Amino acid sequence: MRSVMFRFHVCAGEIFELKAELNSDKKEKKKEAVKKVIASMTVGKDVSALFPDVVNCMQTDNLELKKLVYLYLMNYAKSQPDMAIMAVNTFVKDCEDPNPLIRALAVRTMGCIRVDKITEYLCEPLRKCLKDEDPYVRKTAAVCVAKLHDINAQLVEDQGFLDTLKDLISDSNPMVVANAVAALSEIAESHPNSNLLDLNPQSINKLLTALNECTEWGQIFILDCLANYTPRDDRESQSICERVTPRLSHANSAVVLSAVKVLMKFMEMLPKDLDYYGTLLKKLAPPLVTLLSAEPELQYVALRNINLIVQKRPEILKHEMKVFFVKYNDPIYVKLEKLDIMIRLASQANIAQVLAELKEYATEVDVDFVRKAVRAIGRCAIKVEQSAERCVSTLLDLIQTKVNYVVQEAIVVIKDIFRKYPNKYESVIATLCENLDSLDEPEARAAMIWIVGEYAERIDNADELLESFLEGFHDESTQVQLQLLTAIVKLFLKKPTETQELVQQVLSLATQDSDNPDLRDRGYIYWRLLSTDPVAAKEVVLAEKPLISEETDLIEPTLLEELICHIGTLASVYHKPPSAFVEGSRGVMHKRLPAQGTECPDVGNAAGGSAPEAAPSIIPSQGDLLGDLLNLDLAPPTTAGPTPSTSGMQMGGMDLLGGGLDSLVWLPAMKAKGLEISGTFARRAGVIQMELVLTNKAMSVMTDFAIQFNRNSFGLAPAGPLQVLTPLGPNQTIEVSLPLSTVGPVMKMDPLNNLQVAVKNNIDVFYFSCQYPISMLFVEDGKMERQVFLATWKDIPNDNESQFQIQDCHLNSASNKLQGSNIFTIAKRTVEGQDMLYMSIKLSNGIWVLAELKVQAGNPNYTVSSGTRRDR
Amino acid sequence: MIGGLFIYNHKGEVLISRVYRDDIGRNAVDAFRVNVIHARQQVRSPVTNIARTSFFHVKRSNIWLAVVTKQNVNAAMVFEFLYKMCDVMASYFGKISEENIKNNFVLIYELLDEILDFGYPQNSETGSLKTFITQQGIKGQTKEEQSQITSQVTGQIGWRREGIKYRRNELFLDVLESVNLLMSPQGQVLSAHVSGRVVMKSYLSGMPECKFGMNDKIIIDKAGKGGVTNEAGKSTSGKQSIAIDDCTFNQCVRLSKFDSERSISFIPPDGEYELMRYRTTKDIILPFRVIPLVREVGRTKLEVKVVIKSNFKPSLLAQKIEVRIPTPLNTSGVQVICMKGKAKYKASENAIVWKIKRMAGMKESQISAEIELLPTNDKKKWARPPISMNFEVPFAPSGLKVRYLKVFESKLNYSDHDVIKWVRYIGRSGIYETRC
């Protein structure tokens, strides 16, 4: 301990000496002393006691000395705020210096001193420097705004620095532009909803111009900023892509990767049949390959990104398998990543080459690498069916090498191959059994036991083999114990005569002598099954197993999309969203790829087309919400076929009124690691219910379910927790109904009735979105008084009204059915042979919708005019 | 952005520590030392996350450079920056060693202050940095000089300062290629590619505008189509064009111009720099072919015969030829006979190393060896690593030819003809292996 203490505390004598030197008259001596102080500071010694003496040296025309003193100030100002004030005058004076280097230095350093009193004094000089005639000072001042924002965001806003910074985007000097972009991007990150960068075609054009002229680093800032922009249409997207592609030939890999990010993102918007789309795909491959000739650390970053790109767009690199072949002296982290990509690119066309390579790798030195190579061979077998046979024989060759970890790894993957291609390669079992004794890892032992149990009828001495494991039953890991229990039960069901003793032995070991509840439970289940109904036991235990899927390690699509938006950054290296490793508000913003064909179908035009007399598209004055409600939900059906009465009001194929709605699959099992969610919505006794059907299609038990909604148009939110109390076992299904309230946070969605839902379980969090029938939101007290109705109807301005045609309807039960859905008929009258129905609806958020239904006798087409009003 | 930069010696002692962001505490310095430098196992990744703080590191000899951050930074940029930082330091004080860093720590702090601001990389071109960051201190700058410095640092041509003068305008072009090959025992090419670099040393006055031309297939084809008859005639008669898979350029090259016209134009930095890198995979001239023949005679003897054939013009000479033939681990003795050069069995490297100083084109040479083996019960078969080769040839295996490098300097009184130009081609072996 003593020695450590000594290191960090400069002894008093030394401080005293330095003090004397700092106050010396000789310039050289002063400078040497400051250097000594900085040296002590670097190694972590506390030299803050010298603060006043060092600050005294600040008033100098020697730039080098000045820089040293500034460095000291940046380190210690925070611990000595009162004394730091002494430096302010010099800073302010330096900001007026005729030498631009000194002006910039002063403003740069001041921004690094996080003392409130100093920041107060910083504002005026900073304002001047932002408008300095010298670009060097301006580019430094631009970054300084970001610094100041980090210390005191309010101050920056109050002083109007953000506007000045925005102006700098149009600066004539490219480096000033680049730094302004960097600063604005950073500030914008902490205000996710502000439109700070205000990217529009004009500003994008400015950025693209600066891109050609600024330093390599500036190009990165600009490209990273561009990647946050969403082009208006595919034409704009293409023109940006065209101007970004030259960057792919830059010597700086970071510029290349950032350009790839922009292209990957904007490509989403291009129609696939466009010639340019194909050209772009072709242009992306060579630069990605070139990244692999960079230094190893960069290769690693590039490979992690290529891994994502290959998952998103496999076509880009499908012909480039060879460049991912591992070189003998690649660092291990490069080797492992290359291997991953090789498997992803493996296909029928190149499998022979891949296998030959993998076989080479399996003889290398690094244990992790060899294991991964062996596993990769197994994955190839599962992925490319035609190669399975060759893979199996390669694995057998490897088992012959008798290298312990190779054998174990091979057995684990062969088990998976058996699961994928049952009853095909059992001939190899004999070879596997020979290696039984050398297995010492639980995973390999469990795999081997599984194989023996599964194919017990073909292994003559299966009972002996399993018995040999039984001896040390209690020393085995749980994984092996469970597997052994199941294997012996399987064996018993297949060869009941000679193995009765064995099965009794294992059952008693599992149930009586074990502390492990899982094992005990499984033991008892088997025991009871076997003792009550052996036929049922056979059906249960020897049931046909589902085949395993080929790509188990793919990144979940929504995460993949987010990561594509983060190409080049740490997120893409970790394969995790920034929120997983960044603290605070930064990076919480989820980025998403733009969707292709963003133009919304124009409802107004459609209405005009099918029914010329209907009102053209209405632009409501009461806010977009109402307009959308009408446009979306009452859009006339364009199908000509007969539709049942009122449900003729269709909405994306869904019944508007929600009656008899089939439940839809919202979240397929493939996307959610085996959890499938389907469901519908209903309104019962005034309560909105979300009826969910959860099905576990994975192999393991799911627990800890929870649900959350994103903000939505009508503030829907779960009124209680998701009631899944029992764990959901494999292939089990549970129906839950979740009461919803309408008091949650509101945000307009597109389409209006879209609901984004997150469901969590013990495995992961899954996201999906669904649409609810709007009728669910019609409340029970939506029946308006006649008088009120009349008054309101007149009250509603014309441009709040819209008309639609509903074809092929029959009045018979319309009114009743409508009432069942809380659409109330207020009055009915007959005018000129037409039946007029007046109806009112009230939405959960207090919006009234009044409707007039015009029915012509003998004509099954209805005309609906409706108006809306917000209830106060 | 970058939160801080630390430099450590091999023991993990901090030589330089510069923190740019408030979220990085002093403990970050120790966290990296404990978890990476002093880690028991080999480092498995150049990026490490320790307690929500990310560390990027590169190693130069026994010096560790680490960047630390808590944000989602551009990882590729961080590494590019670290390499650049190494280049800048090397050009200031030579090799990056503990001693040099300790002796120049004031300079390094000054550099770090200039090229990183709040964690954002700024101008990092040594050419311009050296104009105002000097160890002598800048004295007596006139106002013009100062504004010249700042306009250069922030300007479009940050890599070259104005007012450079040479009595003799001269430039050297080196086309350096490394040819990589993996061949099957039957002589089938499994993979082959050339990665090349064009390195330029320019000693030119003023701000010269340069244009570089090579026998790139796309350009030659374009010129041919363009209807310039004599040009087209030339390209078919003698010069062959090559297909370049991909190339990257120094930041001085105007990329948009390359993209649209495929012409390489630039204002070069002063002194030595890398103009471009490229990669080709088609029609590579493989300077040597290795024909292996391995025969196992019983369990204790191997007979190896290797023939190498040189495959280029007889007038050219290859140099520094070295063939490395791996031998099994249980080798007890080796007898070698070779027609040319010297061959030796190196037990420590488990290989026979055959060296030939020079060899002309279209020749062949042979080595035969008898390897005696100790009998072992090791069931594991010998994996037969590939035979590798090293050499140097005075031509470009990709077939790349420099067609011209034109220099224009309108303000000074020298023309393209006055510039003395030198071109040199060197082809070296990269990973050049033949399986046996």
Image (spheres, coloured by chain):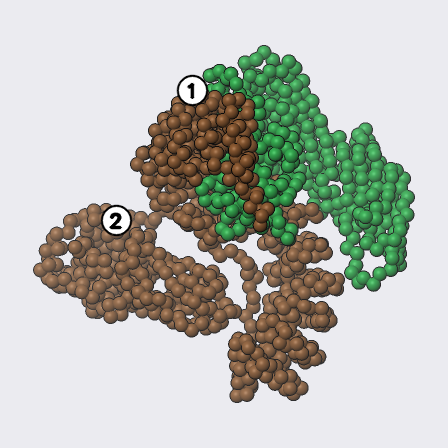
Chain colours: A brown, B green
Can you tell which of label 1 and label 2 is closer to the viewer?
1
Give the answer, above or below, for where A417 lies relative to B245.
below
Q: Which residue is mark 2?
A: A624
Point 69% across, 46% down: residue:
A329
Please report, as a chain letter, where disc 2 is located: A
Residue A695 rendering spot, x and y as whole percentages = 44, 69
The reply to whether residue B224 is visible in this rendering is: no
Q: Quadrant of residue A235?
A: top left
Instruction: Looking at this view, name the residue that lies furthest to the top.
Output: B413
Give neighbour class at mark 1: few <14, some 14-19, many 20+ (Cα, 10 Å). Answer: few
Mark 1 belongs to which amino acid?
A: Pro
Residue occupying the point 18% across, 54% down? A869
The answer, for residue B212, to whether it is visible in the render is: yes
User: Of the residues shown, which amino acid type is indicated by label 2?
Assistant: Asp
Q: Do the numbered discs 1 and 2 sit on residues whose CB atoms are within 8 Å?
A: no
Circle 2 residues within 10 Å: few <14, some 14–19, many ≥20 = few
Q: Is residue A167 left or right of residue B61?
A: left
Residue at x 42%, y 42% (from the top left corner): A228
Determine the residue positioned at 30% across, 52% down: A748
Q: Disc 1 is attached to a residue of which chain?
A: A
- Residue B261's disc number: none
Q: Is residue B398 above or below residue A23?
A: below
Which quadrant of the structure image shows residue A106? top left
Asked whether A591 or B151 is in front, the reply is B151
Q: CA distance from mark 1 to mark 2?
A: 56 Å
Q: Circle 1 sits on which residue?
A: A98
